[in-house]
Structures are given as C-alpha cells and as structure tokens.
Image (cartoon, grey):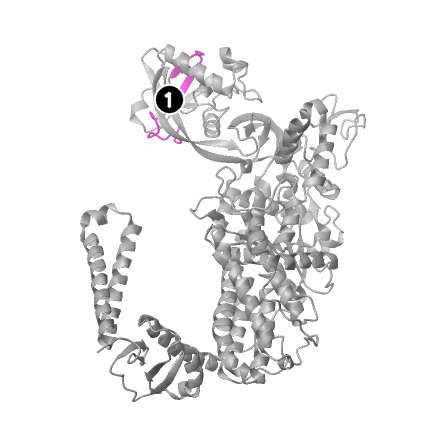
Amino acid sequence: MPGEREGDGVSFLPSMSVLPKTYDAAAAERRWSEEWERSGLFTAGRRAGAEPFVVMIPPPNVTGVLHMGHALNGALQDVLVRFQRMRGRDVLWLPGTDHAGIATQAVVERKLFKEKGLKRQEMGRDAFLAEVWAWKEEHGGIILQQFRALGCSCDWTRTAFTMDENLSRGVREAFVRLWERGLVYRGARMVNWDCVLKTAVGDDEVEDIERKGHLWTLRYPLADGSGHLSVATTRPETMLGDTGVAVHPEDARYRAVVGKKVRLPLLGRLIPVVADDSVDPAFGTGAVKVTPGHDPADYERGQRHGLPLLSILNPDGTLNAEAGPYAGLSREAARKTVLADLEAQGLLEKTEEHLLRIPISDRSNSPIEPMISEQWFVRMEPLARPAIAAVKEGALRIVPERWTKVYLDWLENVRDWCISRQLWWGHPIPVWYDADDLPAASRTPLALGDPHPISKKPIVRQDEDVLDTWASSWLWPFSTLGWPDEQAADLARYYPTHFLSTAREIIYLWVARMVMAGYAFLDRCPFSDVYIHATVLDAQGRRMSKSAGNGIDPMEMIRQYGADAVRFTLLILTTEGQDVKLSPTKFELGRNFMNKVWNAARYVFSSAAPETRGGRSGTHLTDRWIVSRAQGAVQEIDEALLAYRFHDAAQSLYRFVWDDFCDWYLEASKRRIQEGEPGCGATLWSVLATIVRLLQPFAPFLAAELAEHLGESEAAALLPWPKAAERDPEAEADMERLQGVIRAARKLRNENRIGEAERVEVSMRTEDAAPLLAYAPLIRELARLSAFHAGPDVARPPAAATEVLGKDEVYLSLAGHVDLDAERERKRGEIEKAQALRDSIEARLDNAEFVAKAKPEVVERERGRAAEARERIARLREALESLG
C-alpha cells in the first residue's frame, strides 16, 4: 500500500495498543481537542519552505451559536485544509468573529434593560460601549469553541475579531482611500429603515415574510371633475406621501387621463397621472399610487417623471408634518384613521384579502420602511469593474458554476452601497467636522479641538454614525494578515488566499465586496476559488429557523452521535449543487460508519499477527484486489477533493471501507488468518493504515485515535497523504467475477427462503471456468455452499433456481431444501397478487381523467410501479418454471 511498504520513509512504533470493545467518541474528542490546542499542531508556518494553502473562515457573528449551516461549512473547510496539510502544504486556516453591529447592540440593550432597567441613552455612549465590550469578552467566543468541538483545525493563534485594533486601522485606511478617490459621499437616498432600532439596515438584515393582508381600492378624484381613478394599494397610509399616479402606457383604459391631474384624497394636493412601463396592468385596477419617498419602485418612477420626493415618516415610524392632520400618529394608527376617513368621504371603493410579502427586520422583527435618509454611500460601479473582469477572465472561479450568474448580475447592476448605521457599536465613521460643518476623513483618530485637516479650524465633532458591518468584513482576507501594513510578513506569505466556502445568501453581500476590496486596495483578487455550499433544510424541505422551530442543534447531535459522525453525515448527504434535507436520525449513518471502522480495526488488531505488520502484502487474489481497490479509493478521493466534490469523496471512502474492505476482504481473510498466512496479515495492516489516513480529513478524532493505537510516529493530521500507485485491473476483474457468482448464490438463496445455516449446491455454466475453480474454496466459504461446480458442459439441475450473469448461468439446486409443491403454490399466489396490483395500476393509467388531473410526478411514479410489477411477475414465473 502507498505509504505503508518498506523503503517509503514511514516508520512504525514497535508495539501496538489493544483496541477497546467500543469507540468512546466523547472521550476521544475531549482528549484530542486538548492535545491539538496544546501542541499548536495547526499553527501556520511550521513548514516554512512549503507552498501555502490559505482559507479564511467566514467570520460568524460574535453573538452567534453554531447552527447546521455553520456545521456543514466548517466540515467542508476542515476536510479541505486537513487534506492539503497532509499533502505537505503550509496551511493557514484563519478563524475569527464579526462584531455584528446591530445584533450585538440589540443583545446588550435587552440584557441591560432586563437586568438593570437601563436604556443606552441613559448611560451615555462610552459607558454603553464598555458594557458591550464586557459582554463580548464573556460570551463572544462561544461559537469558536463550538467550531473546536466540531474538530476544526484552525490556527487559533491567529484568531481575529473585526474590531481588533489592527482591523480597525484597516477600516479607517480603506475609508480614507475611497474618500481620496471620490468614491465615498454623503447624500439623501432611499434605504431600508428599521423604525424600532432607528437605523438604516442592509439587505442581508431584511427577510421577506409572507402574510395575509388586504388590497384596498381608493378613489382619486380627477381635478377637472370628470370622475375619478380607482387606485389599488396594500399600504393606504403612505398615500399621504403620494406625488403621482402611474398607469401602463399601453393600457387603453387610461390613455385619456395620462397627463391630467388628480386630487390626493384627504390632503387635496394636485398630483399628475403618468404613463410608465413598469406598471403591471393586471395588478389591482392597473393604476398605482406613486410614493417616491417610501417605495423603491416608486422612487425610480419618480426619478423618471420628475415627481417631487416627500418623506412622511419620522425615524421612529410616526408620521411627520408632511402628513398634515395625521402627524404624530404611528404607522398602525395612521392606517386605521386614513381608511376610516376615506370611507367617510366615500373614497374607499373596496377591500379585498390579499397575500403580501412584507420586508421584516431580522433584528427587531418589525416591518422595514423604505425611506429617504441622509447617509454615507460608496460609489460601487468603478469598484465593480475589476470584480466582473476577475470572473470573466478566469482569475476567480465560482463552484458550482451556476452561482457565477448571481455574482455577475448583482455587479453588473450594482447600486451605491449605504455604509452608515445609526448605532453606537461598530467602527466609527472616520470623519470629523469643524464649526462650519466641513467634513474631513482621517486615518488616525482626531480629538475635539485638534486642527481640522482642511480648514485648520478646531474640530468640534466626529460623525456620530458607525460603519455597516460589511465595511470591515469586506477587508477580511487581508486585514487579518496585517494590512494596511503592506510589508507585514503574513500578508506577503499568505495573500492572496486560495479557497472560500460560504452560503449563497452572501454572494453579493460579502463575496463580491471582498473581490472589489481586494482589487481596490491590493490590486489582486483575494481568493482563487469560491465554493457555494448547500443549504441545510429540515426533513420537509423547509429552511431551518428559530421562528419555525425546526432547527437541529449541531451541538446536541455531537453529544448524541459524536463530532465525526456529524461531519461525515453532512458531507455524504450533501450532493454538490443540491440542498440537503436533514432529520436527527440521519446522523445514525455517520455513527454507524464510525462504528464500522472501529470494529474493522479491532478485527485487524485481534486477528493479524503483529509481526506481519510492515511486511509484503500477499499475492492471493483477494490481497491483490483490495490493494488495487485501495489505490482506486485514494485516486477517487484525491480527485474529488481537488475538485471540491466533497460528497463524492465521502462516498468513495464509505464504499471502499464498508463494501470492499469490511464486507468482502475481512470476510475473505478469516480462514487465511486462522491458517496463519503472513501475506494476509500484512495486507490487513497495510490497508488499515491507509484507511486511517484517508479517514483523517473526514473523521479526525477517530483517525487520531486509531493512528495512536497503530503506533504511528507522527500525529495523524500530519501523516503524508497516500499516493496512488498503479492498479491491478486483472485482479479487480477476476474478483468482480467471483463476487458476481457469490451475489447470485446469495440472491437465489434469499428468493427461495433458504436459511444461511443450510449449505446449498451451486453450479455454473460458463466457458471460462478456470479462474473460478481456482478460488472455489473462497466461493464456497463466502456463499456458504456445500459444493461449487463450473464448466461449459454444466447442466441445469432438475429443480433449480437460475440467475443469468451475462453469457453465464448460475444454478442453485433446490432439491432437499424446498418443499417443491408448497413452493409452487406460494409462487402462484405471489403471481396472482402481483398481477392484481399491475392490473389496478394500469387501469388507473388507462383513465384519461386521472392522467390529465394528476401531477406529472404522480403519473410518472405510477408508471414506474407498473413496470416494477411487470418485472416482478416475469421473475416469479421464471422461478415457478425452475421448480419443474
């Protein structure tokens, strides 16, 4: 085996431990986690001359705890970095957390109010921030501890936090550079506004929720007295900010009124009727109100038609003076009052139930208001150009490839980025003002009274806003390596990085922005490959969420099944490009596999003589076959991991260990081990050592435990990855033929309900009998036969079950094992049942009404069932005929 034979530089300790009867996953996880941390095994730089391989962990929120998406992504990254570490690379997997401005501030505010009855405004900014830092020190590392429990082999010595001093310095540097290039500006633009938190929020902090609501039809009187327009809306209170009504230019119903004016109900303001292609004539009445200050689509319509921009809301969601007599009302009270007044004036035409998608802040759980607000923005179009070219010119690859379109669509239609937040926790915007309100950006923090960088007058205040959290995390691939110190040793060695694994939801919110930042500040793409991992769904195919109560706690699964089982289950169930449906019982798959490996290792330890370890593998067909299959597994896993096909890699490992090694080779080895064949023992030790190495990226705790018991001279994580040697196609072909005979015999035995304790006679008509007869003892042993005959002239016994293998036929003699008369009767009964089932299904399929009304997948399933029934009938008839 690769890595196991003499002369390959791998040494073994002279003695080996005895494996306990059962694998104690919890004990192994505790022991190895502590050992890895103590030894600094995963610290980058241990292999100074080796080629680097760098992965930056997507920094989870400091408020967060591990969920299944984190667990999947952590497992994917760890598999890859462990694999590359074993291939000799100098691996840096850098961990860290994000300060999560809104989420963290909200957590601490709730805590302070609950425990002390205090609001942050009562404390003052400095005192409140001191409380946030104290909370962060106490609770902010929970999720990283959970990543450790999962087995993640990060370089914990380089753990970063987005508000560490050096990262904060990078944020100021980035802001000032953009300022100097004219790419940062302050202006009034439409943003997502959280009226509870009183701050702008990003698109990633907004979730569209489907709710039952209403569609109200309102009457807008034409100013010339010739009638009215019926306008449909789901938000009647915002009509107070209307500055127009829009219809589709080709809607014949409204051609006569385009260009006229209507009188805004309740306020009496005259507003124009405009024609705009964006209006859907099929929605409501086909005429829509235009409220440029409170709807993104209306903002665009207003810009196209030069409509005034009115804002009717205060930051807390109450109505302002622009709402006239409704000023001071909350949004909810204003809706009720407006509807009542419209009805009183005969202007509420009708009310219909309507299903709505409402944007909800995931921080305050309150409806988001689109509002015009004075904020800081980054001009994105110049930054987007090199990020677009990176993909089109091949500097950046996105896997699966279909997500490239999402990335490009956003960049090619990018809008300016609102980077300011009305919070206290976060990176303060590095802009200072003099008494004339002249702004200036500075790389170093300035104090009140210092000379203003431009006017030289005393500074009187700093901008009160903080930066959007993404304004620090978009620098993550290089600010964590020492930037803006361009001479930093880590930056020189480990940038650009190689691989990023993340969720689809942040392709544009984070991935695209990191690429833009990489080119803007270092003129290089920050990573070469981006892997978009699957979404973990519940068993019904729904997204897991706290509100739905359908989440699965990875830590609970680790406690129940073990970290290796959780990792392996997630990997083997997650097919590239497809989301995974998950229930807690699915983790039994991973646990069963870990137990299978452990029990196989126990068999080797208890059966193979220690002195055969390190010897030459045997020349028996099964030895040559399992060694060749091992080469194939190494090659398949190697290729799959290099192509980021994690499922395929896990599947190859599973098939090789469970099917080839355990189900076939171990069974085939038992007699030979009893007879003391040294070649068989050497093969067992060699293949087991290779399995431990292949297992290490997927199940590191179990691999470490087995490596120690095997007496490996190096930690499992640093063992060299096996190198695939040439395969033995002749051995694989011969063994496959033997397996075919054995499977056929087992199948015929099962179909005829002959217990394994009964020895049966099997014969085979074949032109090529010599290879089979050479290993007849093995066939007899594994198929539990009393006799096995093969040759071109073998005749079928009078009462025999038959299985066709290509040009060959396998016969199992039923005489003396089956009551032929009773079996004939039973087979006839089974045929009748199968025919009845077939007839009922075919009758359903012959019913044109059923085929027309049923879902296509239902019809297709029924066709499949009919085919299966026909196939079963044919097999039963063959079996009946074989009984004579």
User: Residue 218 placed where, x, y %?
Assistant: 37, 18
Quadrant where the image shows the C terminus? bottom left
**Is residue 807 inside the magenta stretch?**
no
Q: Name which residue lies at 52% across and 13% down.
A: 327
Residue 584 shown left or right of residue 56 in the figure? left
Q: Which residues are magenta?
A: 261-287
Indicate whether residue 279 is drawn in magenta: yes
Q: Where in the figure is residue 828, as x and y percent of width and height?
A: 21, 68
Q: Residue at x 26, y 57 (%)?
A: 863
Crowd band around label 1 with a 10 angstrom C-alpha radius: few (<14), some (14–19), many (20+): many
The amino acid pointed to by label 1 is Trp
Question: Magenta span: helix, strand or loop, mainly?
Answer: loop
Q: Is residue 718 above or below residue 448?
A: below
Determine the secondary structure under disc 1.
strand
Query: Residue 755, image x and y in percent?
Result: 37, 73
Q: Is residue 124 visible?
A: yes
Quarter placement of the N terminus: bottom right
Q: Which residue is mark 1?
A: 216
| Residue drawn at point x = 57 percent, y = 22 percent | 316
Q: Position of residue 204 (x, y in %)?
A: 55, 38
Q: Is residue 723 visible?
A: no
Q: Is residue 487 above or below residue 22?
A: above
